Amino acid sequence: MVAGMNSILRELEQVQDQLSALTPNDGPEHYQLMTRLEELRTRAARLAENVDAEYSTQELLIRLASLQRRRALLDRQHGSASRGLHRPRHGSRGASQVDAHIDEICSLLADRGIRVH
């Protein structure tokens, strides 16, 4: 599974490099590369979900705690940004991705009989 993820990540990097090299006149190629990029991201996300299921319960709890700390940091950054203190490093998309990963891990733990608050 790790080899598959490495392959996807290498291809993602190549596609992103190709996108960066395009000129404004490369519209059709841009569309094709963006489509491929989305396909690769979807495959990587599915593979990542399967990777989580292979972790032990203890490893999942550690990952969950880490994600919860990351979410709290994003909340603090967002609060500071709204008060004009600094710009957050991650947008709301980052927070929603962290929330989705937290939900996935909580679901896996629930399937193992562990209830997390």
Image (cartoon, grey):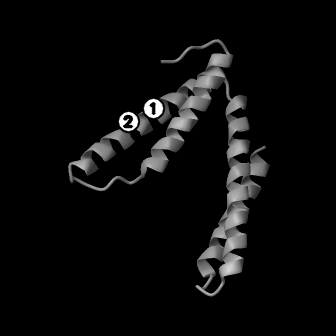
Q: Are marks 1 and 2 in contact (CB under 8 Å)?
A: yes
Which amino acid, mark 1? Gln
Asked which quadrant contains residue 109, the reply is: top right
Q: Callout 1 environment at 10 Å: few (<14), some (14 to 19), or many (20+)?
A: some
Along the horizontal axis of the image, is 32 left or right of 84?
right
Which amino acid, mark 2? Ala
Identify which residue, 18 or 35, lies in the foreground: 35
Q: Residue 83's spot in the image, x, y percent?
A: 21, 48
Residue furthest top in the image: 113
Q: Residue 40's spot in the image, x, y percent?
A: 72, 57
Please tell me which residue is depicted at 42% across the width and 52% down the height of the picture. 91
The answer for how far apart the CA atoms under marks 1 and 2 are is: 6 Å
Instruction: Give the structural element (helix, strand or loop) at label 2.
Output: helix
Label placed on residue 72: 2
Along the horizontal axis of the image, is 32 left or right of 16?
right
Q: Callout 2 environment at 10 Å: few (<14), some (14 to 19), or many (20+)?
A: few
Please tell me whether residue 91 is drawn above or below residue 76 in the rendered image: below
Residue assigned mark 1 = 68
Please tell me whether residue 40 is drawn above or below residue 92 in the rendered image: below
Please tell me which residue is depicted at 35% across the width and 40% down the height of the picture. 75
Q: Residue 115's spot in the image, x, y percent?
A: 56, 14
Please tell me whether residue 90 is drawn above or below residue 99 in the rendered image: below
Along the horizontal axis of the image, is 75 left or right of 86?
right
Instruction: Give the structural element (helix, strand or loop) at label 1.
Output: helix
Please tell me which residue is depicted at 34% across the width and 52% down the height of the picture. 88
Please tell me whether residue 2 is drawn above or below residue 59 in the rendered image: below
Please tell me which residue is depicted at 21% across the width and 53% down the height of the picture. 84
Label placed on residue 51: none
Quadrant containing the N terminus is top right
Identify which residue, 82 or 68, lies in the foreground: 82
